[in-house]
Image: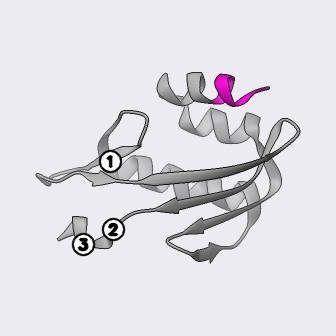
């Protein structure tokens, strides 16, 4: 598994499958510098909820289009890989985009 294979899966819309295949069970995740507890299973559940709340995810920078809103949220991401697994992921976005 490589970062290229990860990108292919995500760009094909297989976000949840990519989490199952590429993330370490004890992955550390952060949202705007706030640690998110629970490892891969909890991250998977949070991402499922995020996907349910948006009508689309566009482009490689994960531009989220919330349901029922004329807005877009740009979300950056930094990953740390160990071997073939993502062991840390940090998401960053400007909360002001949601206003």
Q: Are marks 2 and 3 in contact (CB under 8 Å)?
A: yes
The numbered mark, 1 or 3, whose residue comes first in the sequence reads 1
Task: Identify the residue at image location x=46%, y=53%.
Answer: 76
Helix, strand or loop at label 2? It is loop
- Magenta residues span 1-6
Q: Is residue 95 above or below residue 25?
A: below
Helix, strand or loop at label 1? It is strand
Q: Residues within 10 Å of mark 3 (few under 14, many from 20)?
A: few
Q: Which residue is mark 1?
A: 64
View extreme (bottom): residue: 34
Residue 3 part of the magenta segment: yes
What whole-number distance in Å separates the C-alpha atoms at marks 1 and 2? 12 Å
Q: Is residue 69 above or below residue 62?
A: below
Q: Residues within 10 Å of mark 1 (few under 14, many from 20)?
A: many
Q: Where residue 94 is drawn, which disc sits there?
A: 2
Which quadrant would residue 94 be assigned to in this image? bottom left
View extreme (right): residue: 83
Between circles 1 and 2, the one closer to the viewer is 2
View extreme (left): residue: 70
Q: Which residue is mark 3?
A: 96
């Amino acid at each position: 598994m490589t970062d290229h294979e990860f990108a292919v899966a995500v760009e094909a819309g297989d976000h949840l499958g990519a989490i199952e295949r590429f993330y370490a069970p004890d992955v550390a995740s952060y949202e705007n510098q706030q640690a998110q507890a629970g490892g891969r299973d909890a991250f998977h559940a949070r991402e499922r909820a995020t996907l349910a709340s948006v009508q689309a995810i566009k482009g490689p920078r994960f531009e989220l289009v919330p349901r029922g809103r004329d807005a877009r949220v740009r979300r950056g991401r930094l990953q740390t890989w160990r071997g073939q697994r993502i062991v840390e992921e940090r998401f960053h976005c400007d909360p002001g985009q949601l206003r």
